[in-house]
Image (tube, rainbow, N blue to C red):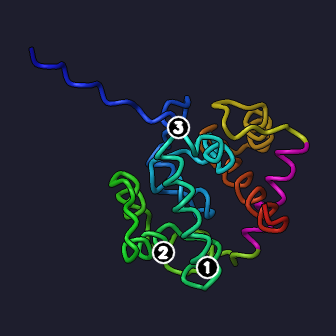
Amino acid sequence: MAKAPRKRQRDPLLEIPGARVNPIHAGQSRFWTAASAAANSLGLDHSTVPPEIAERYRTVSACAREYLRRLQIIQGALVVGELVEPLRPVAVLRWAAQIPIEFPKRITSAVKDVPLARSANASASPLGVDARVHQSALFILGSIAIDEWDFNPAAARNQATGKVRGAVERRGLRIDEQTILDRLREAHEVVRAAIEKKTGG
């Protein structure tokens, strides 16, 4: 009697709720950190599955090991100057193609769909603001979100999004909550990456 084929076991890291990244949001982010670039390359959401979580799963998850391996490669590329911060998604994809590190097609497509004005200048943000000024603004936003609103980037809704939206609308302006959440997550990620870089963690 023929044996029934064994069911393919799912990787434990991918079983974490919210582990999969939204490819559109990932691809259209203004820039990535080393950790989010490594996570995006595997279709993972860096906010839900940061490197320390991957480290906990290293012994039981091939995906976690690959995530950490790619993160190490990207960090090495930053050290030798193959990549420069802030990491523009289009620049990361060009570099990754030479390694090669393959990104999910839905993410690469989203990056390609970003207007050229957003990626034409490595030293400028999408609105033409100097990258250092842009980064400083994110440091301010991220620090306020963490200290004042106890912002949790892994949560679908936060009190921070409501507070920001309320403040914006009181001035007669409009912004949707998903955009607010995306920018808060981006700011949180930048602050976190800067702290890790400074402390060596």
Vertical order, 149 against 188 (above or below): above
Among the two numbered marks 1 and 2 on one chain, the one whose residue lies closer to the N terminus: 1
User: Visible in this render: residue 119?
Assistant: yes
Residue that numbered label 2 is attached to: 91
Q: Main secondary structure of the magenta part?
A: helix
- Residue furthest to the bottom: 81
- State yes or no: residue 143 in magenta: yes
Of the pair 130 and 49, the residue shown nearer to us: 49
Which residue sits at x=37%, y=72%? 97
Q: Is residue 183 magenta?
A: no
Q: Is residue 174 visible?
A: no
Q: Residue at x 84, y 37 (%)?
A: 150
Query: Relative to residue 126, is residue 24 depicted above or below?
Result: above
Q: Which residue is mark 1?
A: 84
Between circles 3 and 1, the one closer to the viewer is 3
Residue ID at (57%, 80%): 122
Magenta residues (range): 133-147
Q: Are marks 1 and 2 in contact (CB under 8 Å)?
A: yes
Cα distance between the residues tagged 3 and 2: 27 Å
Q: Label 2 amino acid?
A: Ala
Are the residues at dot 3 and dot 1 in contact (C-beta closer than 8 Å)?
Answer: no
